[in-house]
Image (tube, rainbow, N blue to C red):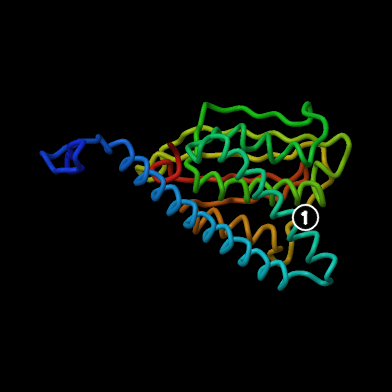
Amino acid sequence: MRILPYRTSQDKIDGAIVTFVDIGGVVEAEAHQQLLVGELNHRVKNILAVVSALAQQIARRSGSMEEFKNGLIGRIQGLARTHQILAAASWSDVPLQGLMEAQLAVFVGAPERITMTGPDVRLKARAANAYSMVIYELATNAMKYGALAEKSGRLEVTWRFETIDAKRCLVLNWREIDGPRVLSPETEGYGTEMIRRVIQYELDGTVEPNYGESGFSARLTIPTDENLA
């Protein structure tokens, strides 16, 4: 509300002018902007924390500066691809298959080498970030030691819903086919440690790796309540 004096042509006050302006839309826009700024600050803080943790863990495992550089850059690029997908979805839920396709396209030039089968699953933004890190580590290991290291190698990824201990869970099976024989490592490598930690602490799930003569496979289980849209 605005109140101004009404003046005559002789510059004498002869009343008042009261003006009412609806500022509801302006107030809502300002509140929404503040919310977006707060969300952006939160996400930037989280991203920097993730990058810092990655750098520390890779540094402990790297034998040279070149190994550290390649490991860090590759993982940051993986995060960037995920954030691009999340930004396109306005930081809402994203499809699991689309997320995997974006990550795996960097490692496999021929789409026919990858088979994906499962119901429509949409991940919440936080879970999508964590899952993309897991997929990146699995694909990296497959490129170095598994099926993706061979031209004839193939990758089969399936997922389904199961009820485990009275909880509805998403179970994803990662299976490498026609690759070199893999042996169970004597010590846990960085990629395996990263997968286990992310699944356990970020997604409250479990991972069961299997090193067999026919190739590497893994079963990933996560509860749906906190991770799926």
Q: Position of residue 117 (x, y in %)?
A: 61, 27
Q: Quadrant of the N terminus?
A: top left
Q: Is residue 3 visible?
A: no
Q: Nearer the viewer, residue 139 or 22?
A: 22
Residue drawn at the location 71% of the way across and 66% of the way down? 58
Quadrant including the C terminus: top left
The residue drawn where x is 70% and y is 63% is 190
| Extreme residue in the right direction | 151
Q: Position of residue 76 (x, y in %)?
A: 69, 54
Local packing at callout 1 (Cα closer than 10 Å; few below 14, some 14-19, many 20+) is few
Viewed as shown, does residue 17 lie left or right of 25?
A: left
**Viewer-proximal residue, 69 or 140?**
69
The x, y position of residue 134, in whole percent, is: 62, 50
Q: Residue placed at 58% from the left, 57% from the top? A: 196
In the image, is residue 101 above or below residue 213?
above
Q: Secondary structure at mark 1?
A: loop
Residue 91 visible (yes or no): yes
Q: Is residue 175 left or right of residue 148?
A: left
As rendered, which of 171 and 7 lies closer to the eye? 7
Q: Quadrant of residue 179?
A: top right
Q: Label 1: which residue?
A: 183
Apparent side of residue 73 relative to residue 117 in the rendered image (left or right): right
> Callout 1, which amino acid?
Leu
Image coordinates of residue 195 in percent, x first then y, are 62, 55
Q: Residue at x 59, y 51 (%)?
A: 208
Q: Residue furthest left?
A: 15
